[in-house]
Amino acid sequence: HPARILALAGSPGAEPKLDAQVRIGGDAGASEVVLLNLSGPLRSHSEAVITPLLVPDAPIVAWWPNHAPAHPGEHPIGKVAKLRITDSNHCSNAREVLDRLAAGYRPGDSDLAWTRLTGWRAQIAAALDIAGSDPVTGVIVEAMPDRASAWLLAGWLAIELQCPTEYVPVPNAVGISSVTLQRASGDIVFSRPDGHTLSIKQPGFPERQIALPLTSLSEALTEELRRLDTDRVYEKVLTKGRALVSSPDTASPAAQEVAA
């Protein structure tokens, strides 16, 4: 879609200075790209710099590719945006980052760590649709250590299935490596050790192999820009689901309450 893209960067230095570059056509495609490099005091007034460049009546999306502010909705740029996109998978200590985002959540906040779970959620929901009435009594999510997407997936399952849920870090795993749904009639196991192909083992059905590669940045961002609205499921998972998940290095009081 045609768009005006404003890319902001900061440079060290005490002198207030603005360097800008405008790209139209070529690698910008149907968009207008404005690159802004702020230095000195201007770095604290980014919203004043971009406001004259905004297109009237066009939806505004703010995206922090790397480390996001503690509370995106309170950030000067976030205040003018309809959708605020972060990516917790790029942050260290994902659990603390998610807790901080949950504490400062505002409608319109989103996270590519959640967007990358669309394929996992679809396959798990499809398997449960044909699983019969035997309830899930426990969930184990195995993934690389300190993975925000794993916390969010486990939180979603804890809310939807109302059972004890555990996130188990696995060294050398590629993203999320497996999800096990424990049931009296036999476990349903989703396994993706190579980061490309998902194997589904379900009692009463032959093993299935489904392509489920790691979601690329462009794919995740495209999905977010296609929606441009508040994701209420993400809101519930972020603000309530994460607290229901336990891990070997932490014991969640809420998770213990659910288990009891």
Image: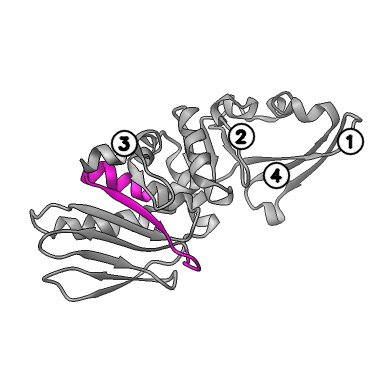
Residue 168's image quarter? bottom left
**Tag 4, which secondary structure?**
strand
**Tag 3, which secondary structure?**
helix
Nearer to us of marks 2 and 4 is 2
Left or right: 232 with respect to 184?
A: right
Q: Earlier in the sequence, mark 2 or mark 3?
A: 2
Left or right: 77 with respect to 226?
A: right
- Crowding near the residue tagged with mark 3, few <14, some 14–19, many ≥20 C-alpha atoms within 10 Å: some
Q: Are marks 1 and 4 in contact (CB under 8 Å)?
A: no
Query: Residue 140 at what x, y percent from top left?
Result: 31, 57
Choose between 237 and 225: the one closer to the eye: 237
Query: Residue 63 at what x, y percent from top left?
Result: 59, 40
Q: Is residue 136 above or below residue 233?
A: below
Please name the residue that numbered disc 2 is placed on: 69
The stretch of residues the image draws in magenta is: 153-174
Please name the residue that numbered disc 1 is placed on: 13
- Crowding near the residue tagged with mark 1, few <14, some 14–19, many ≥20 C-alpha atoms within 10 Å: few
Q: Earlier in the sequence, mark 2 or mark 1?
A: 1
C-alpha separation, residue under disc 1 versus residue under disc 4: 25 Å
- Crowding near the residue tagged with mark 2, few <14, some 14–19, many ≥20 C-alpha atoms within 10 Å: some
Residue type highlighted by circle 4 = Val
Q: Earlier in the sequence, mark 2 or mark 4?
A: 4
C-alpha separation, residue under disc 2 versus residue under disc 1: 21 Å
Please name the residue that numbered disc 4 is placed on: 33
Residue type highlighted by circle 1 = Gly
Q: Are marks 2 and 3 in contact (CB under 8 Å)?
A: no
Please name the residue that numbered disc 3 is placed on: 254
Q: Are marks 4 and 3 in contact (CB under 8 Å)?
A: no
